[in-house]
Image: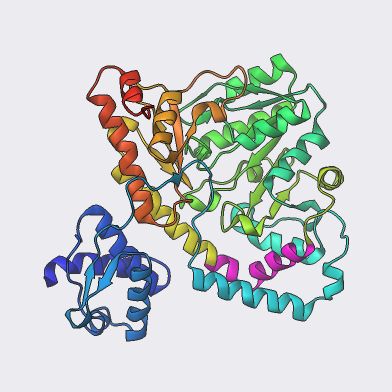
Amino acid sequence: MRGFAMTWMDSALLSNGPIYLRIVNSIERSVNTGELVPGHRLPSQRALAKQLGIDLTTVTRAFDEARRRGLIEARGPQGSFIAPPKAAFGQPVDLSMNVPPVPDATALNDALRRGAAAVLARSNAPNLMTYHLAGGSPTDRHAAISWLQPMLGDVADAGLVLAEGAQSALASILISQTQEGEVILCDHLVYPGLLQAARSLGRRLLPVAGDADGMCPDALERASRQSGARVVYFNPTCNNPTGLTIPLQRRVELARVLQQLDLLAIEDDPYWHHDVHAPTPIAALAPAQVYYVSTLSKAISPGLRTAFVRCPSVRHAEGLALALRSICLMGHPLVMAMVSQLLLDGSATALLGQVLEEARERSALAAHLLVPALNVQAAGLHAWCTVPEPWTDAGFVRAAQLQGLAISPSSSFRPDGAQRSRGFRLSLGQASNRRQLHSALRRINQLVNAADSTSDADAVWERRQPRS
């Protein structure tokens, strides 16, 4: 038994993050891959602590968390064993909303409690309950600089604007820099929030041709000249929905086009931290042309709804702050103060590390479990899948709904006039734990396998219809 168990124990020591979570994650990963199976007896807590050279209380905490997740069960003096799956096959799972997995509950509670206490101890409480100027306080911008430094290097305070989420920032940039009816250049599949903002504001999205490396520079130049468009939208890292990260050389070429044509770009980059090899942002290559948008909502939690925008100039920052006031008078001072505290005391970095570790585990799970026919690209918080023949994406989504799964078809990301795409997005962070995600991904595979066993996808769909 020792030789069999050493594999998952060695894996725990090689990963990152708190040691107790490394142990839990290693157990869960090994259960999902079949290395550890239900009924397998684990070493005693004391033996495992000795084997790993760590404190017994750390192992106890790991086993407690593993039991909470339903991974192991205690059988009194017999010890701890890998538990059988408890998730019901038909349990509804939302794979349509892109949210980060929740950090460790204890660590999150501790960080929020310490942060709130520090904010109230150092701030004037009545001041947190009154109106503030849009764009963030000097302290907020100082904290924002620390967040943006890994991506952009040194950032000038005067060019920074804080917003209540990236969606507010995107809409406000469109308001400040475009007119009703004006064209915005973009990819053939884009973030749904951009679609909603453009349609609500009467702006028109014009898709630009791309290839395996992203938007083509010559196509961007041609589209700009022909349409007269002055603004282009990029989502260059772990793209939502395709998972594509634009490589550095292509970013350099796109930056050159921006400079040559004097185009403004919106670089929406919420998943930069999720790519361990994320290239230099376009904003760092052409800083006078690009609004760089980063948000905590996709990096840590939607509850810390704050976005940081590095603007091309002070004039652009002033225009953005004015536009923000027209749609959202101000961000909530208490939330912004909490965010700044978490950034400055290091808690945000620790929480980010936990989210990234879990997100990468879930991406690896999707890449490992989903059948090759789906041509999976798993990155960031989601996986992009190609709809296999003979399915249509609409038919596949309807069939998934009958299996208790909410997924997002390609039509949710397609601007008017864009070429049709046979695909769907699976959001990996909303599932309460990896076992629930594991079950959901297995159901996706079953739909594909059911279609493989028949030449008529409509017949598969019909077989799943409830009978009256």
Q: Nearer the viewer, residue 35 or 233?
A: 35
- Where the N terminus falls, by quadrant? bottom left
Q: Position of residue 365 (x, y in %)?
A: 34, 49
Asked if residue 295 lies in the magenta stretch, the reply is no
Residue 96: x and y, percent?
Answer: 50, 41
Residue at (74, 41) in percent of width and height: 288
Q: Position of residue 368 (x, y in %)?
A: 29, 45
Q: Please give the range of residues in magenta.
A: 333-350
Indicate left or right for 64 with 107 as reference.
left
**Picture residue at 40% right of the left edge, 28% below the top:** 396
Is 207 drawn above or below residue 29 in the view shown?
above
- Residue furthest to the top in view is 226
Q: Pick the residue in front: 14 or 124.
A: 124
Please name whichever residue, 406 or 356, is drawn nearer the observer in this view of the structure. Answer: 406
**Residue lying at the far front of the rendered structure:** 468
Left or right: residue 17 versus residue 191 is: left
Q: Residue at x 46, y 24 (%)?
A: 394
Instruction: Quarter of the image for the C terminus: give it.
Output: top left
Identify which residue is drawn at 20% across, 65% down.
Answer: 7
Q: Can you see residue 195?
A: yes
For the stretch drawn in magenta, the main secondary structure is helix
| Residue 358 rendering spot, x and y as whole percentages | 43, 58
Based on the picture, tell me whether residue 335 belongs to the magenta stretch: yes
In this orientation, which residue lies closer to the viewer: 298 or 319?
A: 298
Q: Is residue 109 above or below residue 327?
A: below
Q: Quadrant location of residue 235?
A: top right
Q: Answer whether residue 142 is visible to the viewer in this image.
A: no
Eyeballing the image, is 117 above or below 148?
Answer: below
